[in-house]
Image (spheres, rainbow, N blue to C red):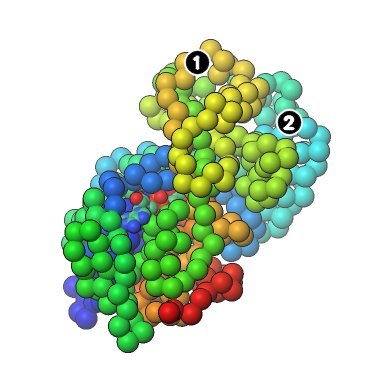
Amino acid sequence: MVSHMPAIVVIGGGVIGTSVAHYLACKGAKVTLLEKGDLASGSSGACDGLIFIQSKKPGVHLQLALASLELYEELYKELPGHIEFKKSGGMVIFETDAEFEAMCGYIQDQQATGIDVSLLNTNQALKKEPYLSKHIKGATFFPLDAQVNPIALTLGFALSAKQNGARIITRTIVKGIKIQNNRVSSVQTDQGDFNTDVIINAAGANASEIAAMVGINIPITPRRGQIVVTQAVKPILKHCLISAKYIAAKYHPALAKEKGEGISMEQTQNGNLLLGSTREFAGFNKQNTPEGITRIIEQTTRIIPELKKLHVIRTFAGLRPYTPDSLPILGQVDHPKGFVMAAGHEGDGIALAPITGKLIAQMILTGKTDIPLDAFAVDRFQLQKETT
Ligand SMILES: Cc1cc2nc3c(=O)[nH]c(=O)nc-3n(C[C@H](O)[C@H](O)[C@H](O)COP(=O)(O)OP(=O)(O)OC[C@H]3O[C@@H](n4cnc5c(N)ncnc54)[C@H](O)[C@@H]3O)c2cc1C
């Protein structure tokens, strides 16, 4: 047991908050996690489980994703429960010659950073995924892209944190934060106050609300994603699939409006297909819409016509914590001391959860991190306000 550990409160019981709690508690830190609903009741319980590496931008984004993938190899064996981690490999599907050309440049950048993404023509792609429509122009393939069950992962992190001494408190809404001598001193909730030395803001799409409690203005906004779930069937997909449009829409919201959002498809270990997803700015509205569902069904059945034979059993929507540059906000802010950000992972929170938890725990407990956090600092947006 390490001595002189600071008292730490994590706000948010999604995949990021629970990962941070897990890595901290495993090092003997004194952690309390506060969640306003149930664990995984936010985006982490309303998403796909893709750990897509080849969709990440070359540079720090890709570096984080690769480091996270490595951690998954251990977590799969160590976390309580079965997180359904599988390195199924992933494909990005092109439907037009223009997409094919655009993706060639993207792949060259990936290959230059040592990522072994290969380019497949139509026949090669159909050999890998026999249910693909013959109209597709080709695909990329990366064998290390993986998938996981995001709810099992969140619960696994939380249970591990608890087994290592963390307090996990649900149904508790954070209402305010007290600051004394330029340091955070307590978290105020509808269930009473929690004294603390460090606060970690892992409140997902609500992270701006929490940051505002200490006078910081951060640009995290909800970006809705709708998903369609089919009945469980025999294996139809061997890999995780996304369309080339998905990559364009992810990084360029204006393109998403003009050309469509693109799609993702995965088959869970249970046999259900998760067909997603929209990328919309609709405030905190988590409802599905007929237009969103129709767009998903049109695009996914065009790429895999076999899907037309399946029943839809349910639909749901989640709110991605969007930042304008598609990178999360991580690390200690300038003021107040003890206030740490771990939010804004947009559509990558499942893929990046392990490395986020590990780096935040390292930063708090040792002051040093395996990967520098500078690129993820909140002040890159230059929106920080003076505390009043
Ligand atoms: C349709 C869709 C598909 C996606 N697919 C993928 C994918 O394939 N791969 C991938 O990597 N990512 C994917 N994502 C993104 C991923 O879901 C998010 O990046 C991730 O879940 C964010 O985790 P989080 O812990 O930051 O947020 P959340 O899971 O939203 O957790 C934040 C928590 O904070 C709590 N909270 C908020 N305010 C308060 C308060 N005042 N007091 C107490 N608690 C509070 C909330 O209740 C919530 O539980 C997808 C998202 C969507 C919507």
Query: Which quadrant is home to the C terminus?
Result: bottom left
Q: Residue tagged by mark 1?
A: 310
Q: Is residue 309 above or below residue 247?
A: above
Q: Residue 337, located in which quarter of the rendered image?
A: bottom left
Q: Where is residue 294 in the image (x, y as percent from the top left)?
A: 58, 25
Q: Nearer the viewer, residue 54 or 264?
A: 264
Q: Please name the amino acid that badge 1 sits on.
A: Leu
Q: Is the C-beta of the residue carrying label 1 under 8 Å from the nearest atom of ligand 1?
A: no
Q: Is residue 251 above or below residue 118?
A: below
Q: Is residue 205 above or below residue 165?
A: above
Query: Which quadrant is home to the N terminus?
Result: bottom left
Q: Please name the amino acid that badge 2 sits on.
A: Glu
Taking the spot 57% from the left edge, 15% from the top edge, the residue there is 308
Q: In this rendering, does residue 203 appear at all?
A: yes
Q: Residue 212, located in which quarter of the rendered image?
A: bottom left
- Local SS, label 2: loop
Q: Position of residue 231 (x, y in %)?
A: 43, 19
Q: Nearer the viewer, residue 88 or 276?
A: 276
Q: Position of residue 183 (x, y in %)?
A: 33, 81
Q: In this view, does 137 lie to the left or right of 271?
A: right
Q: How crowded is mark 1: few (under 14 residues within 10 Å), some or many (20 or more)?
A: some
Q: Which mark is residue 62?
A: none
Q: Residue tagged by mark 2?
A: 95
Q: Residue 297, located in which quarter of the rendered image?
A: top right
Mark 2 and mark 1 lie on one chain; the one further toward the N terminus is 2
